Amino acid sequence: MFRLFVALSLPAVLRSQLAALHAGIPGARWVPPENYHLTLRFIGEIEGWQAEEVDLALAGIRSRGFDLTLRGIGLYEKAGRIQAMWVGVERSDALSHLQSKIETALQRSGMPPERKRFAPHVTIARTDRAAPEKLAAFVQAHNLFRAPPVPIEAFTLFSSRLGKEASVYEAEVEYELA
Ligand code: ATP
Ligand code: MG
């Protein structure tokens, strides 16, 4: 079995800009910069033969490269807990197009449809053990965060191994954009 997801990996300049946001919030677990990514589609646990179908389907996608701009910071709350802090994405039709092509391709390869609406973001911290007031103050202070646009020239099929601390992601296949 493989645990897979499709994502954009971020150029080094962007990683350091995000890493520069790290600050002393007790209990916050900052995502290690090598783990930053923007999930386009979570696939989950599948068998090897299905992974091959997925790879074939993704390899057939023809889509254009585009500029990605990260902007804004927010908190993700679930079941009354603030689970994560994320950096948002400036609206991009090219990104939405790519995401929907990936969704279509995966459904053709036999994956069940994703029901959740696509909400592009980059998770920068796990925050369920941090104080909500501290998190809210941090978000207020950094609300105007905006990174310069970066060119996106590929998307990536990642495998994920869940660990006690941070998960380990591995780029399995890179698919070039035109
Ligand atoms: P952990 O689960 O230990 O916190 P993780 O979330 O970093 O680790 P995965 O669970 O393998 O690692 O997830 C990989 C990527 O897919 C992450 O961006 C995660 O937010 C996203 N993801 C995981 N599960 C889902 C899901 N059910 N729906 C949508 N996206 C998901
Ligand atoms: Mg997870």
Image (spheres, rainbow, N blue to C red):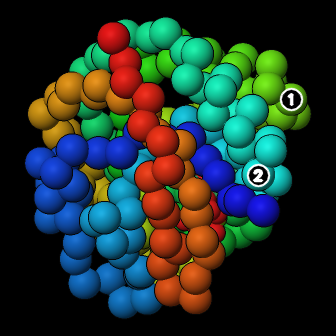
Would you place residue 163 above or below residue 161 in this image?
below
**Label 1 or label 2, whichever comes before in sequence order:** 2
Residue 36 at least partly seen: yes
- The residue nearer to you, when weighing 148 against 137, is 148
Quadrant (top left/top right/bottom left/bottom right) for the N terminus = bottom right
Q: Position of residue 8 (x, y in %)?
A: 41, 39
- In the foreground, 40 or 125: 40
Q: Secondary structure at mark 1?
A: loop
Residue 128 position (above or below residue 99): below
Q: Looking at mark 1, is its residue's CB closer than 8 Å to ligand 1?
A: no
Amino acid type indicated by mark 1:
Gly
What residue is at 55 percent from the left and 36 percent from the top?
40
Residue type (three-letter) at the residue carrying disc 2: Gly
Residue 117's quadrant in the figure?
Answer: top right
The answer to whether residue 74 is visible is no
Corner quadrant of residue 119: top right
Which residue: 25% across, 84% down?
24
Front one among 164 and 140: 164
Q: Residues within 10 Å of mark 1 (few under 14, many from 20)?
A: few
Lateral position of residue 178 relative to residue 115, left or right: left
Q: CA distance from mark 1 to mark 2?
A: 13 Å
Judging by the rendered image, the residue that carries numbered circle 2 is 48
Task: Give neighbour class at mark 2: few <14, some 14-19, many 20+ (Cα, 10 Å).
Answer: few
Residue 116's quadrant in the figure? Answer: top right
Q: Nearer the viewer, mark 1 or mark 2?
A: 2
Mark 2, ligand 1, within 8 Å: the answer is no
Instruction: Identify the residue at horizontal 23%, vertical 72% (top origin).
Output: 22
| Residue 173 spot, x, y in % from top left | 48, 42
Identify residue for label 1.
110
